[in-house]
Image (tube, rainbow, N blue to C red):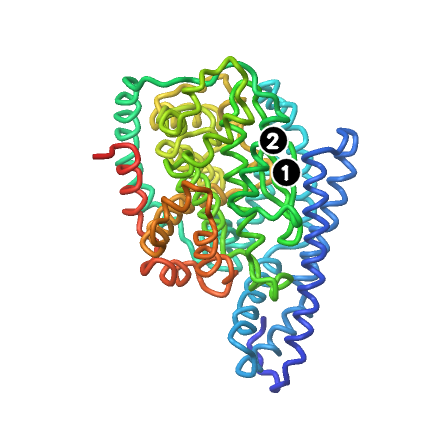
Amino acid sequence: MSNRRLPLTDTHAYKQLEALFHKIHNLRHLASMAHWDSATMMPPGGSEARGEALAEISSLINDLLGSPATGELLERADQARDRLSAWEQANLREMKREWFNASSVTSELVRRHAIASSRCENAWRSLREQNNWKDFQPLLSEVIELTREQAAMRSDASGLSPYDALLNLYEPGQLSSQLDAVFSRLKAFLPSFVMHIAEQQKADVLVQPAGQFPAEKQKALAMELMEAVGFDFQHGRLDTSHHPFCGGVPEDVRITTRYSNNDFSESLMGVLHETGHAKYEQGLPRKWISQPVGRARSMGIHESQSLFQEMQICRGQAFLQFSAPLMHRHLGNGQTPDSCWDADNLYQLYNRVKPGYIRVNADEASYPLHVILRYELEQDLISGSLKVADIPEAWNEKMQAYLGLPTKDNYRDGCMQDIHWTHGMLGYFPTYTLGAMNAAQLYQAANQSITSLDEQISRGDFLALNQWQAENIWSWGSYHSTDALMQQATGEILNPDHFIRHLRERFTPA
């Protein structure tokens, strides 16, 4: 925006902006449905055309958002900001942020990036299964190169480093220097803690589930638990995809999962994780649903809600007391002993600490190490100090250093396991661990606020807990900054001590 002064106006410019962002919301709605369809049921032959269509929408949205006309409206609206309500002022602030992000890159680059990403993702679905890094590498290289171009443009516009410019797309106001300080604490604590707990748990005597667990039975259990914890099926649904995700819009939230016939826990906890995302979306302030202030605050806060649901609640003793009989009813198959469905046994099963290859299946203690590995690699990819061709070797080195696991020539379970980089979503991974830390801090605050919370959860009563989340997180959308939101909900900004304390209490109880 220019620095020239424009004459004071009434709030007409702001109302024009509201109409514009309502239109953008509708376009994003359509794009999210097209993406959901491409991940769940689109025939393979439709991928190229779908990629072109999604690229067209991305380019159109960027044109609308980042146009000089939008910048002019923002300047005019800013002159009348004193006549706006507090929520309208916050909305104007978020409009400016979206305009800046859009105007910092050209729509042509956005379009080329979207096409390359679509091509890379669709190829990834089969190439990962084939462990085929050779054919995947050039596709990923194109996406990373275009992402580096975007990062450079955003850096020039913002004055941030190229990586921080990407990070701020997902976590506004966050700097990698702040992340480095937090992650260095986790790197100092977690590797030895993980190995110690894994060794200690070897002495546990557990009853493992046995036999086959048909996908339709797993889905029926998942849907019953989704409804119990507060998912609104009038405004959402559950489907199957290669990589679990939560998408759509608050009025129509789409959750996907994948099923393993001999391990129901992978799908069930994945569904409950995505349900945490979905409840946040469904709980956003409906009055502002089509406006930037009505959107989720950040991906770190979004991830806090999914991990609040999965890790803080659903892997806890109280929830398993409630859900164990439901699991038995849906999945009991005559091959698994009844004692397997005891809540104490399930608690131990769901809280095993064992370093593994796959991030989405990782236990709560080792998960941040998967994130830190990716964070460090993508910083090097953006700086240019790491080439795409060298990712497998660098991945192998860090996996051995952090988790004691080699991945040489195992691309499927190594550097090809995630979908994020196929979309050029570099800067996103750190939000997973920010979310884990936020979740621990938020749950502690909720537990202090709600009398007999464990007892309520153990009988399947989530009303007070959902109300606490709605009042402290969901209903605020993007009205507050992340720090202000956490301060309001917990009494302090993010403090990693709460997460470390949570891990010690869960895995080394007195």
Q: Earlier in the sequence, mark 2 or mark 1?
A: 2
Q: Mark 2 points at which residue?
A: 219
Which quadrant of the figure has residue 472? bottom left
- Which numbered marker is on residue 238? 1
Give the quarter of the figure containing the C terminus: top left
In the foreground, 142 or 328: 328
Figure check: 364 above or below 411: below
Q: Compared with residue 70, is residue 369 higher up or lower down, i.e. above or below?
A: above
Give the quadrant of residue 238: top right
Residue 45 lies, in percent from the top left, at 79, 30
Q: Residue at x 67, y 35 (%)?
A: 39
**Secondary structure beneath disc 2?**
helix
Residue 504: horizontal and vertical position, in percent? 26, 37
Instruction: Give the percent coordinates (x, y) of residue 224.
Output: 57, 37
**Pick the front one: 46 or 491:** 491
The spot of residue 480 in percent (x, y) is: 46, 64
Report the amino acid beneath label 2. Lys
Q: Is residue 172 visible?
A: no
Pick the front one: 460 or 467: 460
Residue at image position (58%, 61%) is: 98
Q: Is residue 61 left or right of residue 442?
A: right
Query: Where, by quadrant of the figure, is residue 455 drawn?
Result: top left
Name which residue type carries label 1: Leu
Do the numbered discs 2 and 1 sit on residues whose CB atoms are within 8 Å? yes
